[in-house]
Structures are given as C-alpha cells and as structure tokens.
Amino acid sequence: MTQAKAPRADAVRNRKKILDAAGEQITAHGPDIGMDQIAAAASVAVGTLYRHFPTKTDLVAAVVAEYVARVADDAEATRARVKAGARALAELTAFLSRVIEASATDRAVKAAAHALGAEPGDHTVEERAGAAVAALIRAGQDDGDIHPDVTVNDIYLLFSTAPTDRPAADRARWLALVTPGLTTNARVTGG
Amino acid sequence: MTQAKAPRADAVRNRKKILDAAGEQITAHGPDIGMDQIAAAASVAVGTLYRHFPTKTDLVAAVVAEYVARVADDAEATRARVKAGARALAELTAFLSRVIEASATDRAVKAAAHALGAEPGDHTVEERAGAAVAALIRAGQDDGDIHPDVTVNDIYLLFSTAPTDRPAADRARWLALVTPGLTTNARVTGG
Amino acid sequence: MTQAKAPRADAVRNRKKILDAAGEQITAHGPDIGMDQIAAAASVAVGTLYRHFPTKTDLVAAVVAEYVARVADDAEATRARVKAGARALAELTAFLSRVIEASATDRAVKAAAHALGAEPGDHTVEERAGAAVAALIRAGQDDGDIHPDVTVNDIYLLFSTAPTDRPAADRARWLALVTPGLTTNARVTGG
Amino acid sequence: MTQAKAPRADAVRNRKKILDAAGEQITAHGPDIGMDQIAAAASVAVGTLYRHFPTKTDLVAAVVAEYVARVADDAEATRARVKAGARALAELTAFLSRVIEASATDRAVKAAAHALGAEPGDHTVEERAGAAVAALIRAGQDDGDIHPDVTVNDIYLLFSTAPTDRPAADRARWLALVTPGLTTNARVTGG
DNA sequence: TATGAATGAGGATTCATTCAT
DNA sequence: GATGAATGAATCCTCATTCAT
C-alpha cells in the first residue's frame, strides 16, 4: 500500500559494494577479518555496513547466499542444456567440477559461515538449485548412467566436502575419485 | 641409578588433562575457544597450560599430533591384520570408516589447526601412518581389488575431506559414495 | 566550502584528555602503568585510547613530543628576549632552570620513553629547539660570557642528566654546580 | 652464642652466582628481566633464588648494595692515596670518573632499583663511602682547590645524574662540564 | 542516511610468587 | 635445601557493535 520507497540508488549500490568487498576480504583473509576492514575495502564507513547488515553473521550469510544463488543459476542452466539433449552424467560431473572451482575462489566463506553459525537466509535459492540438480539426476538415471540410489543430498554431501582449498590437481583427482560412486556400475559388489 | 628425574608424575598428568580438555573444548566450541576456558576445563590455571604449550598454536598442534598418532596406530594394526591374511580392501574401507568416526569427535580440531597455521611437529608419526597405508594399498592391488592408480595421497585426500561434522548417516553414505573410486571396477568406462 | 571535516570536536578533546592523563599517570606511577588505568584517568574507554595511539609506545612518544614542543617554545621565546637585548648567559641559565622545573613534573616520562624505545616522531620540533638554543649560546659567546667550547649537545647532555625527580633544593644546587662549566672562566686550568 | 651455622658452602656459592647473574641480566636486558631468566643465568632454579632473596626487590637491592660496596672500597682507597700525599682534587675527579665508568656497565641497575622502590639495605656501606668522600673533599678544600661550599651530597648528586648510559665521549664531556663547579675559581663572578 | 569515534568485553600471553616433591 | 611445576592477577591489544554528529 505504501509506496515502495522510491530511489535508494546509492543504498543499493552500497549494498553491492559491501557484499563484494566482504566476499573478497573473507576469501583473502579468512573469517576473522574485521568489520572495519571490510568497510574500508568497500569504501564505506562501518556504520553504513551495519545499516545494511545488522550483524557480522548477517553479512556473511548474505555473502553465502549470493554464492548459492550463482550455483543455482549454474544448476538451472545445466538442466536446460540436458533438456536440450546433452548427456546428463557428463553435464552433472562438469557442473560439480565448475562449482568446486568457483568454491576454490570463495574458499573461506563457508568456513566463516560455519564459524558464525550463519543460517542461510533465503531458502528459495536453495530450492531452485535443488530442483535443478534433482532433474539432472533423474535424467541421468533415465539414461542408465547414474546409479538409482543417488539423491540430491548426495550431491550436496559431495559439494560440502570438496577440497576447495587444495591445489587444482588435488581437486581434479578428488573429482575422479568421487565420480564412480555416482555411476551405475560403480558398486563394489557389482563385480 | 636410573630413576628418570623424579617428580614428573603430576606434570605428565596435567599434560594429559590439558590435551584432553583442549580436544574436547575445541571440538565443542570451535577453534576460537579461549585459552582460559580450556584451562578451566582441564582444571588447571592458564599459566600451567602455557608452561606445557607456549602458544595456542602449539597446543592445537599437539592435539592434532595426538590424533594423528592414534590414526597411525590404527593403520599399523590394520596392516598387521592384512599380513595375517585379512582381505585388504575390506580392511582399508573399515579403517577409513573408523578414522572418520573418530574424527567426528575431534571435529573442529583440524579447522583450528588450519586457522592457526599449526605445523605438525612430529613427522615420524605421519610417516608411520603413511607406510602402513601404503602397504594396505599394495596388498589390495595384489588382490586385484584396489585400482592400480590409487595412492596414499588419495587416502589422505579422502580423509581430509570426510564430512566429520555431519551425522552418522551422512558419514556412512559418504563412505559408500567414495569407496567405488578406490576399487578395480569402479571406472566409469568399465560398463 | 572550506569547513574542515565537521565533527572532530570531541575527538580533539579526547586526544588532549588522553595525552594529559597519560602524562600525569606515567609521572605518578612510572612507565609500567597500565593502559587501562590511563584510559580510566582520561575518562575514556581503552578502545578510544587505542584509536588515538595504536600502541603504548606511540602514546608515550606523543607525550614526550608534547613536552619537547613546550621546551622548543620556551627556547624560542628566550632567544627572542635575547635578541631584544637581554643578557644571553642569564637567560640561558634561567631557561635551563625552567626546563628542569617543568621536567620535574613530567618525571618518569623520559624513562618510559626510553624503556619502550619510543622514537621521537617529529624531528621538526627538536630542530626548532636546537636552533634557538644554538642562537642563545652564540649570543652568550659573543658577550664573552659563555665558554667558546660549549655546544648545543652540551645543553642536551645537561638536560638529560638533570635530577628531575629530586626535591627543588637539589635541583637548584645541581644547577649551581653545573653552570660554571658553561661560563668563560670556568676552566680549572684557567686559574 | 649459637654456633654460626656451620658449612653452607654451596649456599654461599649460590648466593654469589645469583648476585652475579642478576647484575649481568639486569644490565643487559633492563629491570623488566624475569626472575626465571635470572635463575637460568645463575644455573639455579627459581625456588633457590627465592630462598636467598624473598622478593625481586630484595634481589635488586642486594645487587645495588654490592655495587655500592665496590664504590665504597674505591673511595677509601682514594682517601688513602690522598693521605699519602696525592693531590685531593685530581684524585676526586679521577674517582668520579672511575665510578661513572663502572656505572656505565651496571647501567640499568639503578633504574631497576628505582622502578622497584628498592631501599638500600646496608647503610654501613654508604656511611663508609660517605666518610671517605668527605675526607677527600676536606683535603681538597685545605689545598685550596675545592670550593668551600662543596659537600658530600653534591658528589652524590653528581653521581646520581651521571650519564651512565651514554657513550664514553659523552661521559667524558659531562665530567669536564661538571668539574668546574667543584673547584675554587669556578665561580662566575670570579672573572 | 552516512560517518567514524567511542565503547568495553574478551583474548592471548607474561611473570612474580608459592608449594609439592 | 634445591627443584621446577602450578598459580592467577595483570598486561597489551582487538573487534563487534553503538551512537553522537
């Protein structure tokens, strides 16, 4: 009913600046980076930072949310490609790989979130990603490539345990070790 | 003649108390737990704590070292069993499982170590574990159970990414997902 | 247009309060006085104190600098008087006396500075004082009152060895003992 | 009446070791050196150190006392030489110089004593030094070399303000500046 | 609304001193 | 008597958060 609070052009701009700076700083210096330093990196005063995010926890949660949103976008794009005919297993693997690479950049963000007990604020985004990944899995299972037991939670489990802070070679090897567990004939007892 | 410098009885006891308390507290409250709190949990004064470990980093390193030593012991016992005729793959998997279960207790300790840049002091222990694991792998490869590409580093990679802070069900599922990558017929292209 | 960044009024006031309190506290209780106590004496929180002076060393250095500045002012005023016709030797002696009296208040500050290895930040002030004193000496030498060998360093040497922590009578006696060394016919062998 | 507590050979030896070590350590690292470190330098345990000196203050006082005793010895030797015919003023000056040189070594000891509010324990020694110096002064006054106003306290005043922590050149210059104040024709008005 | 100064609890660490062995 | 481990108050400093301008 009330008007949607007109311009706020700079407020929006500030929010973005802060979010970016926070991501960079946490990535670069770990979760113990100070709020003052984040503010400085964003060329804002601490007060402004606190106006946008009442708590450090809130800020970190927002950074994580942004990251999750990117993952969700990627997941949906991947699903679209599969719908258009791409092989599901290959796409899923590539998706996993991409996410891990991205995480390697955002390194400590997860740690920060965990350390602060930050709760993901926006469940919508997660559901979006979840739906897309579920579709990918189902497609792969229909192809007969992905093991029937595999669920979305398995993918999350792998995400959350990926060696994002290790060198690229380790990350690649890890993906290679982990992929068989998703495929049809990967069961040990299958031999 | 050979009494080893009389009165170290309580010092030894204290060292143990501190190490245990540190493990518990870090596990329970993360790496940012205060030294005072660890001291209190060990029923010691901070000074005592600092007499045994000159730095928080040193303390955490010691906790990690203790944990690593236990893993090394387990690895050697496992190797012994295999030498005595047990099937290598099954033993290795069980070993992995056991280590992860134990880690679940020590939860944040690794994180603390990493956050503080703690260096493992005693490389001997690591080598001990490494040798035992290498022997296990070789035995499994001789059995034709373990994939020829698998190395000790792979095992470490899995260790370090295990979801130690997740519920038991997740840990079990993770192990199931990851095992195929170690076995002979786990190659995707094998189908 | 040219307002100099509005609201520094209280910051300035606080800086002054801190500097004063620090001087008093160090004077009264020596260099080992705690930062918390200085803060309390200044009616400020420790944080404020650290915002103004990032280190105890910095704070002490600032206190010393303030003191040096006052000395420099006095030196210049004295030179001005001499330029206007006053007798140089008498003025120099009086100046020495005044500085020592002032020092008696600032007592342990020098010790604190030394103990903390505080470096004087503002060499300008020292040069200002040095120039003024040099002029005084030269004038006195032109008068034939001050011994030709006397240099600015001699004055500094006397400053730094003045018994600032002794009762007034001692300080006066010390000045009397030391003055002959500066005058023309003070050479022992001159007799 | 009771026997004088027989041997204690090692106790005596320990006391000496501690005193020496304390002197060295305080000289080298200032008054804030730890008791543990002094104990280590003396190759004793802290407990032993505390058996001999119940308090850090006591220890420092003892170190100072030892130093004062050496000065007293020198003073008496000097008086003896004057009694045997040496010129009093020259001897007094040389004595002053020697004491300052020695002090330069013991540097921070005085500071330590002051910082801890250490009271000189053995007034006998001081009286011994005082008597000798008084005799020297009187002899010089009888010679007509030393100004009639000069007292023992003046000498103490100079002692206590000597630039013991400055380079040798400064110490020499200081002595030159200060000597005229002690001699007969040092009065300004004498010209 | 943005700014940045102020707050003050909390953290790691030190060190004189005590006390069990 | 000697030893050295234990104690714990005290110190310097940091940092999330509040609030006056």
Image (cartoon, coloured by chain):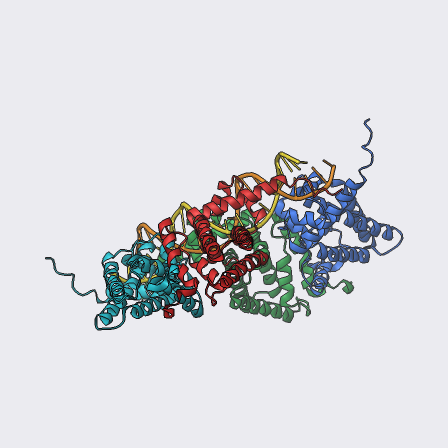
Chain colours: A blue, B green, C red, D cyan, E orange, F yellow
> Horizontal placement of D47 versus C18: left or right?
left
> Horizontal placement of E20 versus C17: left or right?
left
Q: Residue A151, position in %: x, y?
A: 73, 49
Residue at point 62% right, 59% down? B160
* Total numbered circles: 0
Residue extending farthest right: A84
User: Which quadrant of the structure image shows residue D148?
Assistant: bottom left
Does residue C57 appear anywhere in the picture?
yes
Q: Residue A73, position in %: x, y?
A: 81, 48
Residue extending farthest bottom: D85
The quadrant of the rendering that contains the N terminus of chain B is bottom left
Residue extending farthest left: D1
- D81 and A42: which is toward the camera: D81
Does residue D33 appear anywhere in the picture?
no
User: Which quadrant of the structure image shows residue C173?
Assistant: bottom left
Residue extending farthest top: A1
Instruction: Give the answer, above or below, for where C114 lies relative to E11.
Output: below
Residue at point 81% right, 40% down? A9
Q: Residue A68, position in %: x, y?
A: 74, 47
- C168 and C109: which is toward the camera: C168
The quadrant of the rendering that contains the C terminus of chain B is bottom right
Q: Residue D43, position in %: x, y?
A: 34, 66
- D73 and D150: which is toward the camera: D150
- C32 and C184: which is toward the camera: C184
